[in-house]
Image (cartoon, rainbow, N blue to C red):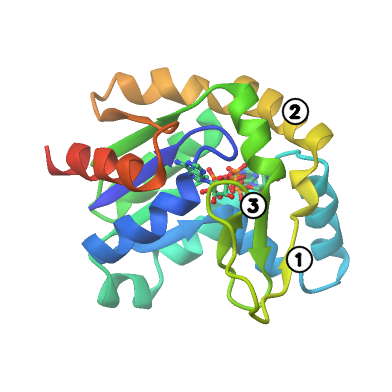
Amino acid sequence: MIIILLGPPGSGKGTSSSVICKKHNLFPLSTGDVLRERIKQPDEFGKHIAKLMSNGELISDEIINQLVKEIVESDKMKSEYDGILFDGYPRTVQQAEFLEKLLADNNQKVNHILLFNIADDAIVKRIVSRRVDRKTGNVYNLISNPPPENTDLELYQRADDKEEVILHRLEVYKKQTEPLIDFYRKNGVVGEVDATLPVEKMIVTANKILAE
Ligand code: AP5
């Protein structure tokens, strides 16, 4: 099964991904996570990506598409999982066209798109409160999902989670990623998730769409 999570920054894609992937034995392919892992290498390429990300700009389609192709065609993917959940990819029409062909070349197609709907002001409040544990990668929220007290978590705030960068990421989303909604509506595979619901209800809604 191939699922794409589509929605603005902070709409709950990553939070939903881990639960859905466990339930359906899918590989969680978050291009944001892959890039955050890559920028730990402080070479020129890592620095180039880190700068774009902390400014809320997209990485070029060529770089992202190549990275996705390597993962989709890896042996591990084919032998251990029953599909892939894309979180944060595709993000441009060019990436979506590339993915269609890549999947077709591998005898696959997109089965479901989950579109996470939430207003901009709610997104800003949510993202400025996000904290990530450096050791486990677990994501918390100071308001909706506070980290446990008295633990040795190493919480940090993502460089792109500052208010001014979030506002720019929202602009980039509207300009470059929102056109994908119409692109995929033509295929009739878009299901809408109310991302303002509490996490558990949001995920129940997503799972209902996947079961239809
Ligand atoms: P990426 O990491 O993909 O970020 P994003 O798409 O902007 O999404 P986020 O990770 O910010 O949010 P999310 O929807 O996963 O929300 P979450 O579940 O964490 O991309 C980062 C950057 O990498 C891009 O800006 C770009 O530079 C680059 N990049 C990545 N992919 C690329 C591509 N394909 N092409 C080009 N460049 C690319 O939730 C957010 C917070 O809210 C958390 O604190 C969570 O606990 C809380 N929360 C979640 N759901 C709820 C709920 N229902 N109620 C209350 N709180 C909730």
Crowding near pointer 2: few (<14 within 10 Å), some, many (20+)? some
* Closer-to-camera residue (18/50): 18
Q: Give the mark nearer the N terminus: 2 vs 3.
A: 3
Q: Which residue is mark 3?
A: 142
Mark 1 or 2, closer to the camera: 2
Q: CA distance from mark 1 to mark 3?
A: 26 Å
| Residue 35 visible in this rendered orientation of the protein | yes
Q: In this picture, is 188 found above or below 81? A: above
Mark 3 CB within 8 Å of ligand 1: yes
| Spot occupied by residue 160 in the image (x, y as percentages of width and height) | 76, 46
Local SS, label 2: helix
Local SS, label 3: loop
Q: Which residue is mark 1?
A: 39
Which residue: 83% across, 32% down?
Answer: 164
Which residue: 46% across, 25% down?
Answer: 180
Q: Which residue is mark 2?
A: 167
Residue furthest to the front: 150
Crowding near pointer 1: few (<14 within 10 Å), some, many (20+)? some
Which residue: 55% across, 36% down?
Answer: 91
| Residue 59 visible in this rendered orientation of the protein | no
Disc 3 residue type?
Leu
Looking at the image, do the residues carrying marks 1 and 3 touch, with CB atoms under 8 Å apart? no
Q: Give the mark nearer the N terminus: 1 vs 3.
A: 1
Looking at the image, do the residues carrying marks 2 and 3 touch, with CB atoms under 8 Å apart? no
* Closer-to-camera residue (194/82): 194
Mark 1 or 3, closer to the camera: 3
Mark 2 or 3, closer to the camera: 3
